[in-house]
Amino acid sequence: EKAHKEKPNQPAPRPPRQGPTNEAQMAAAAALARLEQKQSRAWGPTSQDTIRNQVRKELQAEATVSGSPEAPGTNVYFSTDPVAASIMKIYTFNKDQDRVKLGVDTIAKYLDNIHLHPEEEKYRKIKLQNKVFQERINCLEGTHEFFEAIGFQKVLLPIQDQEDPEEFYVLSETTLAQPQSLERHKEQLLAAEPVRAKLDRQRRVFQPSPLASQFELPGDFFNLTAEEIKREQRLRSDAVERLSVLRTKAMREKEEQRGLRKYTYTLLRVRLPDGCLLQGTFYARERLGAVYGFVREALQSDWLPFELLASGGQKLSEDENLALNECGLVPSALLTFSWDMAVLEDIKAAGAEPDSILKPELLSAIEKLS
């Protein structure tokens, strides 16, 4: 199946939610109280309210990942205010945030000079071919729009002892008469942050299938060009020889870190106890907590704690702040869902059974994996 295949969003009407019985709640409360004595668990908080609050936080934070590019299916809204729009472009359309900070600080310095020396004409002109301007500002998308939006105009000015004029940004007299506006725009520029696009999880549910561990990934899952992919394939043929060479731990870690940056997205499937598969798309550098939140949101009994197991039955790290690529869950992975056995046994002992695993509206849209 194609990970980025668009599906119409027509969920079935959600039936009224049936909460756990009193017996189940009492049994679960007893088990949770006992489990709370442990310092940490992979499934996070223990009380039902805390779990739900954590889900909300995780869902709100899904797109707030460092270096996350805009993905298909995301929505970014552009401001009609030209100053705000240009600032958004500076922070969002330039990937190197260190270079963005240097450029923004340089622009702020230009504006500070105008504010501190309003009578000095030299500060109201910026030579576009100036080395600092070229290296720090001209290279950033959105900077020219910012200068023009706050009142600078491009003008050709003569240069002493030079035949041809050169292009300058010159502050208009109208803007110069309103110094408070420049100060306001400077503060707006310094306080801005990148716009983070929210990734469409493209959640799908599949029937039990022997193809669960087979993934077909689109090209945009990789931060590699076609030529780089061919090069990677050639390098794989040298893997045995490379592994035979004695390398220091630092060399190995550096090589591993380079590998982590190759992926933009990851496609995760979670095999449930009944064999059904829950699938979602994540940024490669999203946090592990986002996966737990995604799974919890799909559960009929989302108040019950659970665990996720990687291949080989190994429990995922208890640190939900770890990035998915740091956990080896890129560019795809099959996980196994498991209820917390201690709580499940107490609920069964009270004569209660968990509801069906997934919410009815998800099961109504189940597909065959092919």
Image (tube, rainbow, N blue to C red):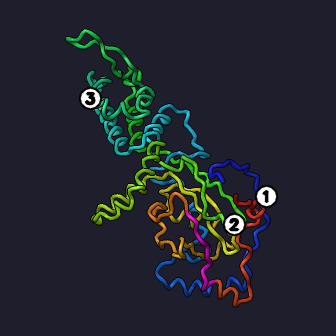
Residue at 27 percent of width and 21 percent of height:
121
Neighbor class of circle 3 (other Cα within 10 Å; few <14, some 14-19, many 20+) is few
Which mark lies nearer to you, 1 or 2?
2
Q: Position of residue 183 (x, y in %)?
A: 37, 35
First of labels 1, 3 by sequence position = 1
Give the Cα separation between the discs numbered 1 and 2. Answer: 24 Å
Instruction: Tell me the SS state at disc 3.
Output: helix
Residue at 30 percent of width and 63 percent of height:
245
Mark 1 lies on residue: 12
Instruction: Tell me the SS state at disc 1.
Output: loop
Pick whichever, 326 or 165, lies toward us.
326
- Relative to 252, residue 101 above or below: above
First of labels 1, 2 by sequence position = 1
- State the quadrant of the N terminus: bottom right
The kind of residue tagged 3 is: Lys
Q: Position of residue 74 (x, y in %)?
A: 59, 46
The kind of residue tagged 1 is: Ala
User: Does the magenta-highlighted stretch encompass residue 339?
Assistant: yes
Magenta span covers which residues?
Answer: 333-343
Mark 2 lies on residue: 209
- Residue 131 image label: 3
Residue at 61 percent of width and 83 percent of height:
341
Q: Position of residue 274 (x, y in %)?
A: 70, 74
- State the quadrant of the C terminus: bottom right
